[in-house]
Amino acid sequence: MSISYNKLLKLFDQKGVTSYTITKKDKIIGQATWKKIHENGHIDTRTIETLCKYLDCQPGDIMEYVPDENETDQES
């Protein structure tokens, strides 16, 4: 997987955002998106925009590109 949401998960912890808060109470994202984030799955740019607005941050604050091992081997 090339995109990591570890920064977002840390931000959730810092701000006390739980599955209930973001999916049920505030209805920011759906439960399936919550699961994708935890599994470093693909989410669309509208979701990224919504999360940035909700958390008052920039996309780089919630995700980062991590090259696969195969990609770094090919560059050498």
Image: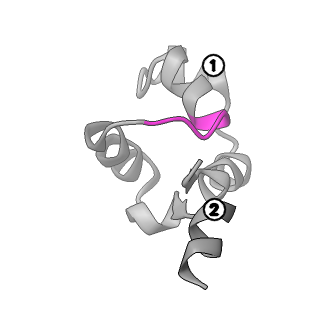
Q: Is residue 28 left or right of residue 62?
A: left
- The magenta stretch is 37-42
Q: Earlier in the sequence, mark 1 or mark 2?
A: 1
Tell which of 69 and 53 is nearer to you: 69
> Mark 2: few, some, or many residues within 10 Å (few <14, many ≥20)?
few
Q: Nearer the viewer, mark 1 or mark 2?
A: 2
Q: Residue at x 63, y 62 (%)?
A: 70
For residue 70, which numbered disc appears in the image? 2
Q: Is residue 75 magenta?
A: no
| Residue tagged 1 | 20
Q: Measured along the vertical axis of the image, is residue 48 above or below residue 22?
A: below
For residue 42, which numbered disc appears in the image? none
Q: Residue at x 64, y 55 (%)?
A: 11
Q: Which color scheme did the rendering employ for the protein?
A: one colour
Q: Secondary structure at mark 1?
A: helix
Q: Is residue 59 left or right of residue 32?
A: left
Q: Is residue 41 magenta?
A: yes
Residue sticking out furthest to the bottom: 76
Tell which of 76 and 42 is nearer to you: 76
Q: Position of residue 43 (x, y in %)?
A: 41, 36
> Mark 1: few, some, or many residues within 10 Å (few <14, many ≥20)?
few
Q: Position of residue 26 (x, y in %)?
A: 45, 24
Q: Residue at x 58, y 36 (%)?
A: 37
What is the chief secondary structure element of the magenta stretch? loop
Q: Measured along the vertical axis of the image, is residue 38 above or below residue 65?
A: above
Q: Position of residue 54 (x, y in %)?
A: 40, 45
Q: Measured along the vertical axis of the image, is residue 30 above or below residue 50?
A: above
Q: Secondary structure at mark 2?
A: helix
Answer whether residue 32 is visible to the viewer in this image.
yes
